[in-house]
Amino acid sequence: MRTHRGFGMPIVMQGIWMFDDVVDDDTLTEIHQGIANGHLDRRVIRPYIPGARHYWARGASIAPIQYTTQAIPREQIVDWCNERAQTRLNPEHGIGWELSTARISDGGMVVSLVCSHALTDARPYLCRQCSRKRCYWEHRDQHQAETLVE
């Protein structure tokens, strides 16, 4: 758990995506479920044997998507991201990651994924999240093509 608590404060990673358009709720739910059923669906288990290492088990608590109710001005995106990074995560007894979203007042959307460092390192985290964004764009392009055909 040192990788979660570090020097007395939780160590988290945060991925931020900004979109020119609004991501629909179905797509956000699909992404959320993909994360919930993937690599981050685990929790840290304290061993029974003193001195033994902690280990992972599947079946973490899953936080719902956090929707910011009011659109935020573009100049406050960094503040919103910093606020989302302060979410209380507890990969041992609670939630290890959280997906949040907010509409931007002049159009578009920002999405934040905050994760405890105890669950993953930066490289696998970034690779998985980049593939999720690519998956979103493929889903979006396919949906637009189907709409044009109809």
Image (cartoon, rainbow, N blue to C red):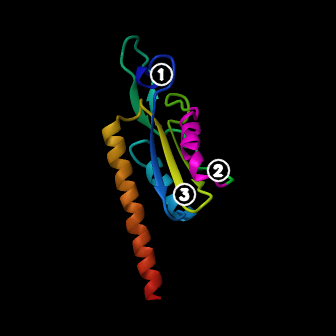
Query: From what the image shows, is residue 11 above or below residue 38?
Result: above
Disc 3 designates what residue?
Answer: 109
Q: Is residue 3 magenta?
A: no
Q: Amino acid at mark 2?
A: Thr
**Relative to 7, does residue 139 appear above or below in the rendering?**
below
Q: Which contiguous range is marked in magenta?
A: 71-88
| Helix, strand or loop at mark 2 | loop
Q: At numbered mark 1, what does the secondary structure look like: helix, strand or loop? A: helix
Q: Secondary structure at mark 3?
A: strand
Tell me, for residue 5, which label it has, or none: 1
The reply to whether the magenta stretch includes residue 84 is yes
Q: Amino acid at mark 1?
A: Arg
Closer to us: mark 1 or mark 2?
A: 2
Real-space CA distance between mark 1 and mark 2, rounded to the nearest whole angstrom: 27 Å
Q: Nearer the viewer, mark 1 or mark 3?
A: 3
Q: On the image, numbered disc 2 is attached to which residue? A: 68
Direction from residue 114 to residue 102 in the image, left or right: right
CA distance for labels 1 and 3 = 31 Å
Q: Are marks 1 and 3 in contact (CB under 8 Å)?
A: no
Name which residue lies at 45% across and 85% down.
148
Where's residue 145, x and y in %? Answer: 41, 80
Counting residues from the start of the chain, the first of labels 1 and 3 encountered is: 1
Residue ID at (55%, 65%): 24
Going by the picture, which residue comes out furthest to the top? 50
Residue 135 sits in quarter: bottom left
Q: Nearer the viewer, residue 73 or 137?
A: 73
User: How many neighbours does mark 2 have within 10 angstroms: few (below 14), some (14-19), or many (20 or more)?
Assistant: few
Which of the two marks, 2 or 3, is nearer to us in this view? Answer: 3
CB within 8 Å, label 1 to label 2: no
144 left or right, relative to 123: right
**Residue 127 at x, y = what percent?**
32, 47
Q: Is residue 145 above or below residue 5?
A: below
